Image (cartoon, helix red, strand yellow):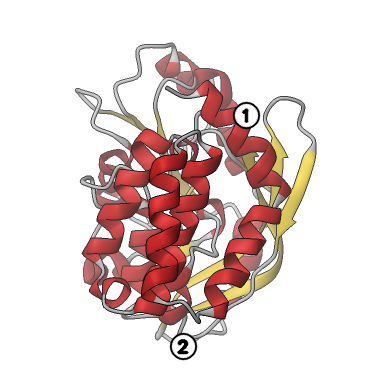
Amino acid sequence: MAKPTVSVIIPTYNRANLLKRAIESVISQRFEDFELIVVDDASPDNTPEIVESINDTRIRYIRLKENSGGPVARNTGIKKARGKFIALLDDDDEWLPNRLEVQVRKFENLDREFGVVYGGFYYVSQQDGKILGKRLPRHRGDVYEHFLRENFIGSPTLLIRRECFKRAGLFDPKLTSSQDWDMWLRIARYYKFDYVNEIVAKYYVHGRQISFNMGKYIPGRERFIRKHLDIWRNPNVLSIHLSQMGLLLLLGGDPEKGLKYLIRSVAIAPFNMENYRKLAELALDSRSLEYIKKILHFNR
């Protein structure tokens, strides 16, 4: 059997009601030379029946024996992948039909030093399907320094050379959050990034993303910072991370800890105007204010 150009990996856990939408957005791609690996993280719901109901020979279904978390499920799919490129899609997100076509074409004109092509995405309300906003690509080339400061890429938009994972490693199961950011930062040490300047995916906003669960997000972000010494050793960069965590904690109902982060952020880099600018951007972001407040109330 000939190897596909792209291996698409959907890790899933207990989201049978959303999974079908994600799968159908893949099999509806205009670019058809792919395999779709659905990695079921031991879901207790009817996920197996949902996958089985979709008749497409490009789908490969893998069920883990026990629930192991998103990074392990993704890593399982990457290890089983046969394609030249890896594309990731969370079970609650969706691709637009142009996603693979435009990005594979982009890679055809890039040197081997480019390991990733990404694109823009819509923020969409899971509740009513309303488009809340969009994020377009901003950075290309050597993006390592940009990643030290922020994760500017949406995970449903990356097309990655499979060899990147051999050099940079796989997703880190020890991180309770920021796993994507950690992975892209490690890849950026070795490879350049490029983008297609168009929307290729929908990122759905609701109450179950790990990024909105402060009980997991903050410890994961702290571990991520300690892991990457280029963040830890740079006061200007570290101050950005501390102030962002401080604001999120304030919005999440932990003002005492939030203020400690903000005070420390100012203390280590009082004249870092970039920090204050990014903090203002986060504070004024309607998605952050509206959804973090609402979602943190939902999460335990």
Q: Residue 251 sits in which quadrant?
A: top right
* Residue 25: image location, x then y, percent: 63, 40
182 relative to 25, above or below: below
Q: Which dot, 2 or 1, sits closer to the camera?
A: 1
Quadrant for the C terminus, please.
top left
Res 250 visible: yes
Q: Which residue is mark 2?
A: 111
216 relative to 268, above or below: above
Left or right of 241? Residue 203 is right
Determine crowd level at label 2: few under 14, some 14-19, many 20+ residues with C-alpha closer than 10 A: few
Determine crowd level at label 1: few under 14, some 14-19, many 20+ residues with C-alpha closer than 10 A: some
Give the residue at the far right of this rendering: 130
Res 19 visible: no
Residue at x 51%, y 61% (from the top left corner): 158
* Residue 262: image location, x then y, percent: 45, 58
Residue at x 53%, y 22% (from the top left corner): 298
* Residue 227: image location, x then y, percent: 22, 63
Report helix, strand or loop for mark 2. loop
Q: Nearer the viewer, residue 130 or 225?
A: 225
Residue at x 59%, y 38% (from the top left corner): 292
Amino acid found under the numbered disc labelled 1:
Lys
In space, the residues marked 2 and 1 are separated at their CA atoms by: 45 Å
Q: Which residue is mark 1?
A: 294
